Amino acid sequence: MPPLNGRLGLKFYANEKVTYNFYSMFANTQGRLSQRDKEDPRIDSEGTSSWRTYNFDLAYMVSKDVDFSFAVKNLSNERYREHASGVDAEGINVVTRLEFRI
């Protein structure tokens, strides 16, 4: 069973072309694991710890057919693992995107 988790944030529309988004993603501690997860050596048999990340993104509509976005995720460089995952999540990271509509 996944822990209580979610995303909470504020989105600011500077104008019709620019949007700023500040948000946090989080999950509570969860000790209940499936039998398969208990047997997986990559997953802590005690379950997963709580975590939270702080994130920022900026979106800019270049034209009606082109969007650009820039994001900085996990600003506090939190080391965490999604529940029942054997892989650590990314530390602080930067994402850019250029989208064309045809």
Image (tube, rainbow, N blue to C red):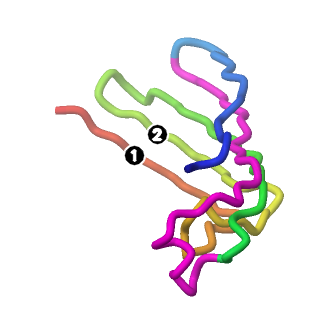
Q: Residue at x 39, y 46 (%)?
A: 98
CB under 8 Å between discs 1 and 2? yes
Across and down, in percent, residue 32 comes to 64, 58
The answer to if 24 sits in the magenta stretch is yes
Residue 98, numbered label: 1
SS at badge 2 = strand
Residue placed farthest to the front in the image?
Answer: 35
Q: Is residue 92 magenta?
A: no
Give the percent coordinates (x, y) of residue 63: 37, 25
* Start-end of magenta stretch: 17-43
Which amino acid type is marked by label 1?
Answer: Leu
Compared with 17, 77 (above or below) is: below
In this rendering, the answer to whether 96 lies above or below 80 is: above
What amino acid is labelled 2 in the image?
A: Phe
Quadrant showing the C terminus: top left
For the point 52% across and 20% down, the residue is: 17
On residue 59, the disc is none
Q: Residue at x 58, y 49 (%)?
A: 2
Does 28 appear above or below 44?
above
Q: Quadrant of residue 65?
A: top left
